[in-house]
Amino acid sequence: RLLLDQEREQGLLYVQEMDKMQRKYSDHVAELQYLLQQNEGVRRDTEMHLMNEVRKGEEFGDMFRQGNEQTEARERYFSEMKTHYEHQLTELSHKAQAERDEREKAEETRELAHQALEKLTLELDRIWTAEQTRREMQ
């Protein structure tokens, strides 16, 4: 009987020990599940934050690309305007030089005409004087 009582006591202690271990295990599992849920919440928050940052990065990238495209378009426009301006400047310079050449030629022609007129006037005066001298001698 003593042996049975001891065995029963040991069995009871064993069962109590098992219950204690079971409760510890259950508490540990509950704690781990709680931590897992917390970690899962943190992971979701982090993923949402990351997605927002990635979206912002893409938006900034798009804005940067658009800015570069606009800058390139402006550079092309200014380059075309510069080329057009240089072409017009060259054309106007040629026209101005042509007008100066024409003015110079016209001035030379006027001077030659003036000299010819003076020669003709002198010749006419000489002829007129000679004619008057001839008339006076008659």
Image (cartoon, grey):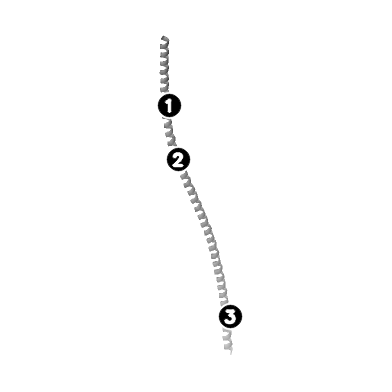
Q: Amino acid at mark 1?
A: Val
Q: Amino acid at mark 2?
A: Met
Q: Which residue is mark 2?
A: 51
Dot 3, crowdedness within 10 Å: few (<14), some or many (≥20)?
A: few
Residue 121, placed above or below residue 55: below
Q: Quadrant of residue 52?
A: top left
Judged from the image, the secondary structure of the residue bearing numbered disc 2 is helix
| Nearer to the camera, 80 or 107 | 80
Mark 1 to mark 3: distance in Å?
Answer: 137 Å
Judged from the image, the secondary structure of the residue bearing numbered disc 3 is helix
Looking at the figure, which quarter contains the C terminus?
Answer: bottom right
Question: Residue 89: percent from the left, percent from the top?
Answer: 53, 61
- Earlier in the chain: of badge 2 and badge 1, it is 1
Question: Residue 21: percent from the left, percent from the top?
Answer: 42, 21
Residue 91, placed above or below residue 74: below
| Residue at screen point 53% across, 57% down | 83
